[in-house]
Amino acid sequence: MLGRLGMTVDECIKKYTDFSREVFKSSWLGKKGDFATKGSYYPAERIEKIVKDCVEEKTGNREEVLLRGDHNCKV
């Protein structure tokens, strides 16, 4: 977020707080159901959507390549 998406520390903290609320919002019963049907407490699909939404917000392209060989990130 800091390097590739060029976000500030404050933006990253806010986005991470938003992410955690969204990812971990399942109830106890919902988590048990996800684990029983998908093998995990927190569905990867939900996490992937949240990350892609953030990438799209910052780059305009939700499929933007995040790891490139030509990056100059020093963070």
Image (spheres, rainbow, N blue to C red):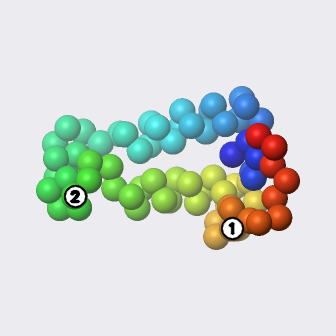
**Amino acid type for the residue under numbered disc 2:** Gly
Q: Where in the figure is residue 36, as x and y percent of width and height?
A: 14, 56
User: Is 31 on the left or on the right of 16, as rendered?
Assistant: left
Give the residue at x 75% y 51%: 5
Is residue 25 at least partly visible in the picture?
yes
**Residue assigned mark 2:** 39
Q: Where in the figure is residue 25, as x and y percent of width and height?
A: 35, 39
Q: Quadrant of residue 60?
A: bottom right
Give the residue at x 63% y 52%: 54
**Amino acid type for the residue under numbered disc 1:** Val
Mark 1 or mark 2: name the one nearer the start of the chain. 2
Q: Which mark is residue 65?
A: 1
SS assignment at label 2:
loop
Give the residue at x 81% y 43%: 74
**Compared with residue 59, is residue 23 higher up or lower down, i.e. above or below?**
above
User: Is 30 on the left or on the right of 47, as rendered?
Assistant: left
Q: Where in the figure is residue 73, as x and y percent of width and height?
A: 81, 49
User: Is 53 on the left or on the right of 26, as rendered?
Assistant: right
**Compared with residue 41, is residue 37 higher up or lower down, i.e. above or below?**
below
Is residue 60 at least partly visible in the picture?
no
**Compared with residue 61, is residue 50 higher up or lower down, i.e. above or below?**
above
